[in-house]
Image (cartoon, rainbow, N blue to C red):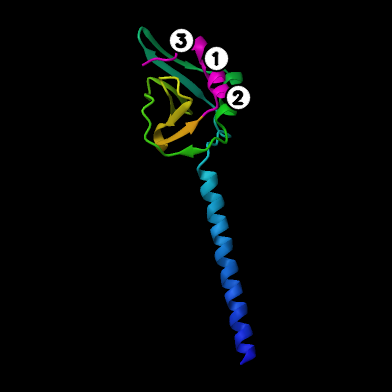
Amino acid sequence: MVKAGVRLLKKNIWLLSAIIFIVILLGGIYLRLDKVNMDSVKKVEVCFQYGNTNAINQLSDREVASVKTIFNGKKLYKDNLSCGFSEAVSIKFDDEHTFCIARDTCPIVYWEEKNRYIRLTEDEKTQLYNLLEPYGFIFPCV
C-alpha cells in the first residue's frame, strides 16, 4: 500500500512539474511577443502629410539605428486612446509595419497592424521629434 502511494505521489510531482514548465514556457513566449522587435528592420520610411507639407522620406542608416534604439524592446499594450493617430504622421518599417505618432504630443505611438500602443519616455519622444524635424514634422499637428 505504501509503494502505491509513493508511486502516485511521484506521478503527481512529475505531472505538476510538466504543467509548471509549460506555463513558464508559454508565459515567456507571450511576454516576448508583446514587445517591439526591431532586429530585422532594414528600411525605415517617414510620412508627414499635414497642412502644406506632403513628405515621404527614407531615413539614413544612422537615423534607422536611432529609431530602432528608441522602439526596440518596448512593451505593447491595448487601449482606446484619443491622442489622434493617422498614417499621415507615421513611420513605416520595411513597408509592412506602420507606427502612427500621436498628433497631440502624447508620448504614445500606435502600431496599426497589431492594434497596439507603445509608450515612450519624454526623452525618447524628444529624440524622435528631433530626428523627424528635418523631414518637415511639427507637433502638435491636430
Q: Which residue is mark 1?
A: 130
Number of on-image labels:
3
* Percent position of residue 95, x then y: 44, 28
Residue type highlighted by circle 1: Asn
The residue drawn where x is 43% and y is 30% is 110
Q: 10 Å neighbourhood of mark 2: few (<14), some, or many (≥20)?
A: some
From the viewer's perspective, is residue 1 above or below residue 80? below
The residue drawn where x is 58% and y is 22% is 123
Circle 3: element type: loop
* Percent position of residue 24, x then y: 57, 57
The residue segment tinted magenta is: 120-142
Point out the frontmost of discs 2 and 3. Answer: 3
Q: Main secondary structure of the magenta part?
A: helix
In the rendered structure, the answer to whether residue 45 lies left or right of residue 2 reads: left
Q: Is the residue under label 3 in contact with that under label 1 (CB below 8 Å)?
A: no
* Percent position of residue 33, x then y: 51, 44
Picture quadrant where residue 104 is located: top left
Point out the frontmost of discs 1 and 3. Answer: 1
Q: Which residue is mark 3?
A: 136
* Percent position of residue 139, x then y: 44, 14
Residue type highlighted by circle 2: Ala
Cα–Cα span, label 1 and label 2: 14 Å
